[in-house]
Image (cartoon, helix red, strand yellow):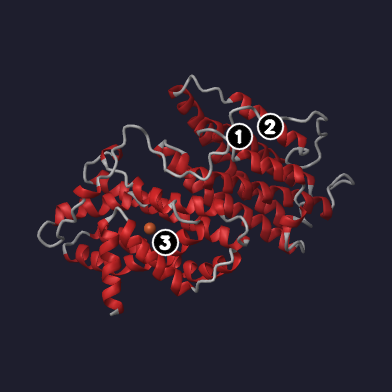
Amino acid sequence: MTQDNISLDQNVQRLVRYAFLEQAVMRTLAGWLPGVPEWDAKNQIGLHIWEDADSCERLRSRLRELRVHRPERDVPAGLVHLARELDHAQGTLELLATAYLVVKRALLEEYRRHPHLTYQVFDAPTVRVLGELTGICERQVAWAEQMMAEVSAAHPDLHWQPWQDYIAGLLAAAGGVDGDQPAPSQQVARPAGHELLLPWRECQREPDFPIFDPDSDIEPDAETQPEAHRAWRFKHYLNEMTAAETLGSILWLTPEMPWEFQYNAARHLWDEVRHSQLGQTMVQRLGYRIKDIWQVVQIYNVMMTLPAVDQYALLTTVIEPNGMPEKRRNIEHFEKINDDISAQAITYDWSDENYHIRWGKKWTPVMLETYGYQETPEEIARRTEQWLMRNTPVKMQTRMAEEHGTTLG
Ligand SMILES: [Fe+2]
Ligand SMILES: [Fe+2]
């Protein structure tokens, strides 16, 4: 303990900056999730979106203990500008080179340094939080370094360095992560050819991935064709990646929504990535490779013709509740044929879905209010369900909506 330790006010100023940068990177990655074609990177970024939201929430929770309840109020303009510019990457390499290898790398340095600057005993809760965030950030940066090497080896013609220099320059101009670094006086201009590509109207896949053909999607009967039904069922699970991508665009398009919504939506997003991974695990057990399975990109693309509020209402108050009766039937079916692993996979999914539906009930009314809709939650559910029945390329969704209509009488 020395006279040089930072004060509570200086501590708060730094924590506000870290929380903002975690949230900013989370939002950029969410917007970019549909735009990343590399399957492994897409899966990892899905996890990181949740980790960043959770790191932000832990910092915000520590800030509340230090009596700061609206940290977003005190964010310096330089950091806000940096956050907007991060979105302007032109592909996976530029995204990794900046969100991870500039911003997260700089955050990691501060997370390691900060515990030595503050009072170990008086401020022990901050030291604990930053210790946990250091581990998360270290893993993410190490992953990005490895992924950069892989992706740049596949695309030696892409020059990502000017974009990385630009974003690093903006961070320096904002005083660095801690705000204490002397800012260079020179203005940095955005490199040419960096128009905003967000939101992604079409989700991207690796070029050799097969695309779903709606006409050849026939649902096998579970009783008479259990093997074919199992494979079909988990191929559709693998395609829940498109639900994660839809949530990524919704998150990016709704920055006016409260932080708590963003926190829930980031978790919802990662859950859908996990449901896709559940499908991946099961189809791999059945002997398929991921790149053999058709990708239902059409559902993301057609939903993107709707505004974000409609997409959220459709997903959480129509598609997810409509899917619940089938999950229960599938659990019973797999239990009956003694396929415990399949039954457990769907039981976990069912458990997650209960939360998604609860979040939909909580946040749809807030969205309608925030974006000036005149409709009630029931009206937007009815309207978007009718839209779904006309527009979905997935027969299963039409069948579920029809079943839902029958149960309504
Ligand atoms: Fe799901
Ligand atoms: Fe879900």
Q: Which residue is mark 3?
A: 315
Q: Is mark 2 within 8 Å of ligand 2?
A: no
Q: Secondary structure at mark 1?
A: helix
On the question of residue 351 being in view, the answer is no
Q: Nearer the viewer, residue 326 or 271?
A: 326
Task: State the residue in front, 14 or 248.
Answer: 248
Residue 98 numbered tag: 1
For the residues marked 3 and 1, what is the alpha-carbon distance in whole angstroms? Answer: 31 Å
- Circle 1 packing at 10 Å, graded few (<14), some (14-19), many (20+), is many
Which of the two labelled residues, at mark 3 and mark 2, occupies the earlier sequence position? 2
Label 2 and label 1: CA atoms lie apart by 8 Å
Task: Choose the circle earlier in sequence order: 2 or 1.
Answer: 1
Nearest to viewer (mark 3 / mark 1): 3
Residue, x 31% and y 32% (percent of image)?
Answer: 208
Q: Of the two numbered discs 3 and 1 on the same chain, state the one appearing first in sequence.
A: 1
Q: Amino acid at mark 1?
A: Thr
Check residue 168 in the rendering and tell me which mark sits there, or answer none: 2
Tag 2 and tag 1, C-beta contact below 8 Å = yes
Q: Residue at x 57, y 56 (%)?
A: 254
Q: CA distance from mark 3 to mark 2?
A: 37 Å
Amino acid type for the residue under numbered disc 2: Ala
Residue at the far bottom: name it: 409
Q: What residue type is disc 3 on?
A: Leu
Left or right: residue 134 versus residue 200 is right
**Total of numbered circles in the picture?**
3
Q: Secondary structure at mark 2?
A: helix
Residue drawn at 48 percent across, 72 percent down: 377
